[in-house]
Image (cartoon, helix red, strand yellow):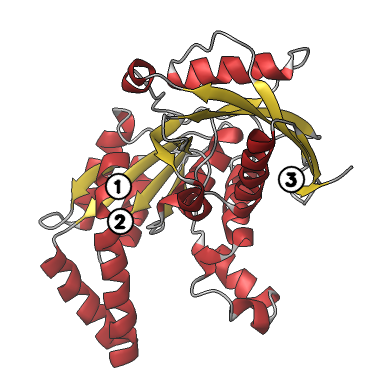
Amino acid sequence: MIVWLNGASGAGKSTAARHLLDLLPGSTLYDPELVGSELRLMLPAARLAQVGDYQDLPSWRRLVVDTAAALLNEVPGPLVTPMPLLRQEYRDEIFGGLASRRVPVRHVLLHAEETILRERADRRAGRAGGAPAQGRCRAHLEAYEDALGWLKQDAHVIDTARLTPRETAERIAEAVHAGAGACDIVQTPEPTAETLAAGVLLFDDADRVLLVDPTYKPGWEFPGGVVEPGEPPARAGLREVTEELGIRLHSAPRLLVLDWEPPKPPGFGGLRMLFDGGRLAGEQIRDLLLPGPELRDWRFATEAEAADMLPPVRWNRLRWALRAREQGRPLNLEAGVPVG
């Protein structure tokens, strides 16, 4: 298990974490900032100049998960991780990766009011080097305020304003023992070979496409998932639509796109199929259900809106699927490019 202590600079994560080691038997401090420091030493300066923070590096997010899993093979756990994680898509990627390795996460937010955090940040900046450090601290606080809405919904919140570090650690330990902050993400194990996946495009009466927001990976997605061994792909799409949204489609969806996704380490690639599930009736849209451990939101989007919501590979697949729907014939893609 990982106890992830989130929060702004000055919330008391690091000091509380050290006290927490005394209260959780077998626990080990795991600081992902060390992963970032090592990447700074290994990556070319030109690559580092392309990102504003090491958390923006896909390699950092991947290594945070891999290192945690490796550590838990060496120590009994839990891992205590004091690390701000203020971008929801990074939270999804890291916590989803941990879920795929069967590592439970307790997400705890250490919070204090803005005035208190600014006072602490100013004191820290004064010790760290004046105006530049103060500017970085204030930018961090602004990012924290922007993230506070989803953080309070996702994590167990502990107000640290009037607590000593020891008292904060005691509150965290109580919350962990009570199961608070559990991120019940449903995620299949990471693939070890190429996979076959089936997605289903569903439309409203304005021909906007239905997109869903997974809790376990960044970006929006189409309803669908991995085809199980021996399962027909179209039937897999129908099953996923029912499991994810509570919608039962009464006819087999029509194939729009078959896309071969090449392996790109650490991914193995495979075949990706998109089917046309047709237009949803008003009562079907009204009765949409979301499984909390898998999906947090849904919305209908135009093609232009979807371009800003989907990761590039999914957007490209959707773009060609919409062309196939217009033309009334399926398209065969390789790496997102039509062939044949």
Describe the element under mark 3 as helix, strand or loop: loop
- Which quadrant is the C terminus positioned in? top right
* Mark closer to the chain start, 1 or 3: 1
Residue 147: give its label. 2
Q: Residue at x 21, y 80 (%)?
A: 123
| Left or right of 79 on screen, residue 272 | right
Q: What amino acid is labelled 2 in the image? A: Ala
Query: 323 or 265, which lies in front?
Result: 323
- Determine whether label 2 and label 1 are within 8 Å by CB: yes
User: Real-space Cα distance between discs 2 and 1?
Assistant: 6 Å
Q: Residue furthest top?
A: 250
Mark 3 burial class by Cα count in 10 Å: few <14, some 14-19, many 20+: some
Question: How would you rate the neighbour count of disc 1 (Cα within 10 Å): few for under 14, some for 14-19, many for 20 or more?
Answer: few
**Residue 82 position within the rendered picture, expressed as x and y whole percent measured from the top left:** 39, 56
Q: Residue furthest front?
A: 327
Q: Callout 2: helix, strand or loop? A: helix
Q: Is residue 111 visible?
A: yes
Instruction: Give the labeled residue for mark 1.
Output: 150
**Amino acid at dot 3:** Gly
The residue lying at 37 percent from left, 21 percent from top is: 288
Q: Position of residue 113 (x, y in %)?
A: 13, 60
User: Mark 1 near mark 3, Cβ–Cβ under 8 Å?
Assistant: no
Judge by depth and name the residue closer to the eye, 167 or 51.
Answer: 51
Disc 1 marks a residue whose amino acid type is Trp
Camera-side residue of 267 and 25: 267
Vertical comparison of 205 with 284: above or below: below
On residue 193, which mark appears? none
Q: Label 3: which residue?
A: 267
Q: Is residue 74 visible?
A: no
